[in-house]
Image (tube, rainbow, N blue to C red):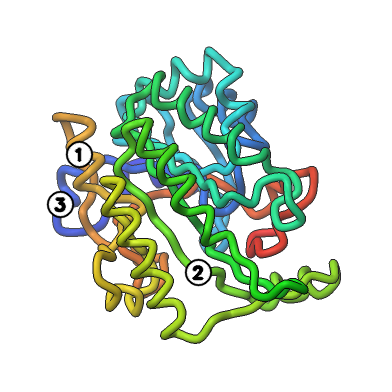
Amino acid sequence: MKKNTSVKQTGPNSMLATPVISCSRRTDIPRCYPHWLEEKLVAGEVVFRAPRSGVRSVSLAAEAVHSLVLWSKDYGALLKRPRLLRRLHDLNPFFHFTITGLGNSFWEPAIPAWHETISQMEKLVNEFGAGRVNWRFDPVLFWPEKSGLASNLPMFARLGAAVAGLGISGCTFSFAHWYSKSRRRAQKQGFEFVDPVPDAKLEAAATMAGEAARLGIRLATCSNDALLAAPGIAKGHCIDGDLLNNLRGGGAAASSAKDRSQRTECGCTSSIDIGSYAQRCSGGHCVYCYAN
């Protein structure tokens, strides 16, 4: 029997809460599966296999969804689907847009160069408003080159100026976490990486925070509380029930309870992720990716 999660809620406001749908931490659905997302929204339901809880059925009818939070490094394919865009307007959408400055490089071979993704970000802002878009500078990477230690960190100020120019005021960041799968991929492809010591990360985070403050951007980290020791770094909530309630502006509330399926230090509130690790993206994986 399918397990219908559209009415299951947890947390202190569970009697009022309606589900927030995450799409998706597990794979880049806007880039690789926008057709699938459009089909599911038209059908008003999605059936998927969650990593630990088996097959689940979730209603995607507008009246059954509080918000739809999308995550992507490339919204180009989604922006070319007008029917999908119209559907998204009914779902209190929020967009996480990852732009690291490494698109079209050996680190992110299938992702467009940064100026193209900034252009996509502008289209999202024009369609949905700057308050519904968050910039993710994630991850911050370091690697050795002949001339010394290289990083995408110097791109932060240039990207930040472009993002701030669009009216976007939020940025979430983290340093690369080298899972064993990521390490094996990097070694297989002949890429080296450097994982800085904690003090070096704090120094880099403080530098980023100063630049972000100059640009009027709130810099936050969601799952690494050690970085909060750097001045100017805020606790992040990639899925933020309070923010989504404000964007919706009335009606049933989203849960403000912590998402217990995420890491201990994760600041996200409760949501249902409808993506699957089986949904693999073509065109080459990002070297540091933990999903595929």
- Viewer-side label of 2, 3: 2
Q: Nearer the viewer, residue 247 or 216?
A: 216
Q: Residue at x 66, y 46 (%)?
A: 103
Sequence-earlier tag: 3 or 1: 3
Disc 2 vs disc 1: Cβ atoms closer than 8 Å?
no
Q: Residues within 10 Å of mark 2 (few under 14, many from 20)?
A: some
Residue 146, how many percent across, how many down?
A: 77, 74
For the residue marked with disc 1, what is the amino acid?
Asn
- Report the side of 226 relative to 55 (left or right): left
- Please tell me which residue is depicted at 36% across the width and 63% down the height of the picture: 221
Residue ID for mark 1: 245
Q: Position of residue 292 (x, y in %)?
A: 71, 59
For the residues labelled 2 and 3, the Cα–Cα distance comes to 33 Å
Amino acid on which disc 2 is placed: Phe
Q: Please give the label number shown on residue 13.
A: 3
* Residue position marked by numbered label 2 in the rendering: 175
| Quadrant of the image occupied by residue 131 | top left
